[in-house]
Amino acid sequence: MSAAIELDNVCCDFGTFRAVDNANVAIKPGEFFSFLGPSGCGKTTILRMISGFIEPTGGVIRIGGQDVKGKRPNQRPTALIFQNLALFPLMPIWENISFGLEVRGVDKAARRAKAEELLRLVDLPGAADKMVSQLSGGQKQRVAIARALAVEPSVMLLDEPLSALDLKLRQHMRAELRAIQKRTGVTFIYITHDQGEALAMSDRVGVMSQGRIQQIADPREIYNNPVNGFVASFVGENNIFDGTAGPVADGFAGFDTPEGRFRARIAPEAVGKAVKLYVRPEHTVLTTAPGAENSVPVTVTEVSFEGAFISVLTETATGKSVVAEIRNDGSATVPNIGAQLHAGFAAERAALLPDANVRG
């Protein structure tokens, strides 16, 4: 029921504009893979090339080891769920789900039985004879998934299917989608600009910017070890310092900034490049006395309660904003606005990163 997807130096041009630039990806059978990036980065173009609605300008796309060049969407073992779902409002739910089977000439009794089976799979038993207008947003999402699964695709392609839902329902549907993918074993390729969705659901994530894939890794690796400044900034929040890196020793380098001298991790591929220092707010600690290293005097300017954590905005003597996050577990003291403190971080928690990989 699942197939591998390979993109081998795939490019896509629209006139003089290159939407996808030499994409190389190998997606495993049965994997939940997400393309993550801002609007216009090329992720939906990749999805449409895989599905057959757009032909690549260059490179090769393989599904299950087979080059799919020239094959129409209905000749590929894929099913695409659009952002607007495209359900048929005048058909009952079971007919919506089995529409693809009707096109293939399957008889009515078999279509109905398959629709009932899929409704149980997506936790909507008893909804077969309802109309689309009688369903909630989350239920419509499940019907769209069931309809796509009805034709037994090897690859499910999902183009930001949760973007129209409210936050709580999106969070619920993340778990539902992941559970359905695990039950069916179908390869899922998911397009999103929402880092929370990508990190929560995916086996691996491909982060994109300006048509280029910046990094492919599992969610923890993407978050904890971004390869460049774009990935660090797009996936999570960061305090960013400008400066100049010094000599490297044991994977660390000194970094001279207007706020002082710091020390942080640096990857071999970043040595010799212009870099910035990135440290996440949850790794930034506020203390009353300076630390042994990576410490800068700050003044608290704002305190924001955000539920699970409290965000403390501070400012250095140079006017640089530094944000620290305090977990709302009752164990930490929340500083007052105007308090004079020191913001610090462990060298192991900070990284010196180059800018994004852009076209030359």
Image (cartoon, helix red, strand yellow):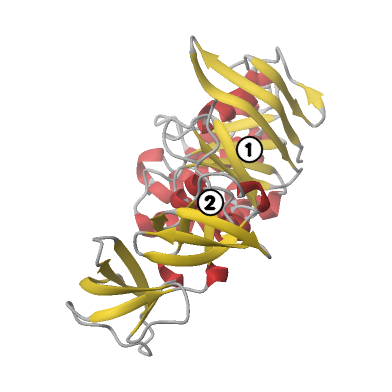
> Which residue does the image show at 68% across and 54% down from the upper left?
182
- Where residue 149 appears, x then y in whole percent? 64, 39
Nearer to the camera, 134 or 129: 134
Marks 1 and 2: CB-CB under 8 Å?
no
Q: Is residue 266 left or right of residue 91?
A: right
The extreme right residue here reads: 65
Residue 248 shows in the view: yes
**What numbered label is drawn on residue 156?**
1
> Which residue does the image show at 72% across and 15% down from the upper left?
69
- Where residue 192 appears, x then y in whole percent? 48, 42
Nearer to the camera, 127 or 53: 53
The extreme top residue here reads: 15
Question: Where is residue 328, by image quadrant?
Answer: bottom left
- Where residue 342 appears, x then y in whole percent? 33, 78
> Which residue does the image show at 49% across and 48% down from the upper left?
229
Q: Is residue 124 above or below residue 160?
A: below
The extreme front residue here reads: 247
Q: Is residue 32 above or below residue 50?
A: below
Q: Which residue is mark 2?
A: 353
Residue 116 shows in the view: no
Pair 1/2: label in front:
2
- Where residue 162 appears, x then y in whole percent? 44, 46
Q: Is residue 92 left or right of residue 24?
A: left
Nearer to the camera, 227 or 89: 227
Q: Say which element carries label 2.
A: strand
Q: Say which element carries label 1.
A: strand
